[in-house]
Amino acid sequence: MSATSGIGVSPELSAEFASALESRSVRFIKISIQNESLVHDQSIPIEGSLNEDLAKLQDLLQDDVPAYILTKLDDSEWLAIYYVPDSAKVRDKMLYASSRASLLKSLGSTTFTDNLFATSKSDLTPESYLAHRKHMAAPKPLSAREQEVADIRAAERENAPSYEGSRTRQSMVGTGVGLKWSLNVESAVEDLGKGQDSAIVVITIDTSTETLVLESTSQVTVESLKSSLPSVEPSYAFFAWPHNYTDPAGREIVFIYSCPSTSPVKHRMLYSSGSSGVFQAAKTLLSSSLNARKIETSDPAELDEAFLKSELGFDNKADITTAFNAPLSSDSVRSFAKPRGPARRRP
C-alpha cells in the first residue's frame, strides 16, 4: 500500500519531527502504522554518542512488530531505519515495505542522508552499524562493461611508447597493456622497409603473454589485400604499397589496424589500447617510409585500392597535384606587386 491508498503521515508526527529538528535533542523517533496512518509512537532523547544510544533500541523494539526509527546522527544529519523482523506477519511486512516512500516524502527526503534495513534487533547494534558504514564507504563494484571501460582508460593513460632495440630483448612498445615485440616481428617489419615489392606483414597478439607475434608475411597486391588479414580476430598489418598517387611515385608502408566487430570484447580492448604504441614504435624501424596516417577497419573485406586512397587522402592529393601542375591562365598571371609603405607624416 502507498500514500495514494491512504497511508499518510499524521499531523502529530509531522509536528514531533519538526520539533526534533529544531531542538536537536532527540535521538530516536519511533513510528508505527495505526488506522491507515503513520503515527508517532515514542521519542528517545540524546544521552550519549550514537553508538552508546543504539543500545536503547533493544528495549524500544519488539521481536515481531515492524517499526520505523528516525535516528539523529552525531551531527545534524538523520538516518532512517526500516525495522521489519523476519518473524513479523506477512501483511505487516508488506504494509511497512510499501509505506517507506510516503514517510520520507512527507517528512522531507533530503533530511535523511542514509537508510538502514534491519530484520532483527541484532542488526541494530553498534557493531552492525559500523559494518553498515564501512559497506557504504567502500567503492561500489563495477559491472563487467564498466570494468572493461576502466581497464581501457587505464591502459590509454599509461600508453607511453619507447624503443630499446632488439639487443635488450625487451618490449619496443611500452604501453599500459605491456605489449612486447618478438624478435621475428621486429625483423619482418625491418625487412619490409628494405624491400621494393608490394608485400604485407600481419601481426597478432599472444593474449597470454601480451606479446606481438608474427602471423604471416607474403607478397600481395592491393587487390588481394583484403584476403590477407584474419576475418574474425583483430590484427595489425604493415602493407608495403608501390603506387603513383604521389609525385614522384613511390613505395609507402601503411599501418592497418583491423578489428572485426565479431571478435571477443577483451581482444578488442587489448588491440585498441595497443595500436597507437605499435604505430609509434614502428616509426623507429621504418622511418620516412611509413605513411603518417593509420588505417582502421572493422571489416577487412573493405580493404581495396579505393578505400586506401580515400583513407590516406590520395584523392585530395591528386586534385592538389593537378591544380599545382596545371598552367595558369593569362588572367591569373600577375606581376609581383610591391607592398605600399606607410603614409608619410606631414610636417
Image (tube, grey):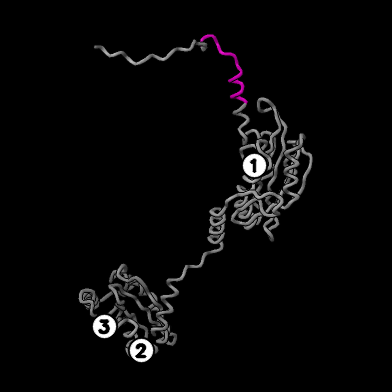
The residue nearer to you, when weighing 293 against 222, is 293
Whichever of callouts 2 and 3 sits on the residue coming sooner in the sequence is 3
Give the quarter of the figure containing the N terminus.
Answer: bottom left
Residue that numbered label 3 is attached to: 46
Residue positioned 45% across, 74% down in the render: 135
**Closest to the observer, 285 or 259:** 285
Q: CA distance from mark 3 to mark 1?
A: 72 Å
Counting from the top left corner in percent of width and height, residue 278 is at 64, 48
- Highlighted magenta segment, given as a residue range: 318-331
The stretch drawn in magenta includes residue 125: no
Q: Is residue 68 above or below residue 286?
A: below
Residue ID at (38%, 84%): 126
Q: Secondary structure at mark 2?
A: helix
Q: Is residue 297 above or below residue 242?
A: below
The answer to whether the residues at label 3 and label 1 have Cβ atoms under 8 Å apart is no
Q: Which residue is identified by label 1?
A: 283
Identify the residue under disc 2. Answer: 58
Horizontal relation, residue 84 to residue 35: left or right? right
Give the amino acid at mark 3: Ile
- Mark 1 belongs to which amino acid? Lys
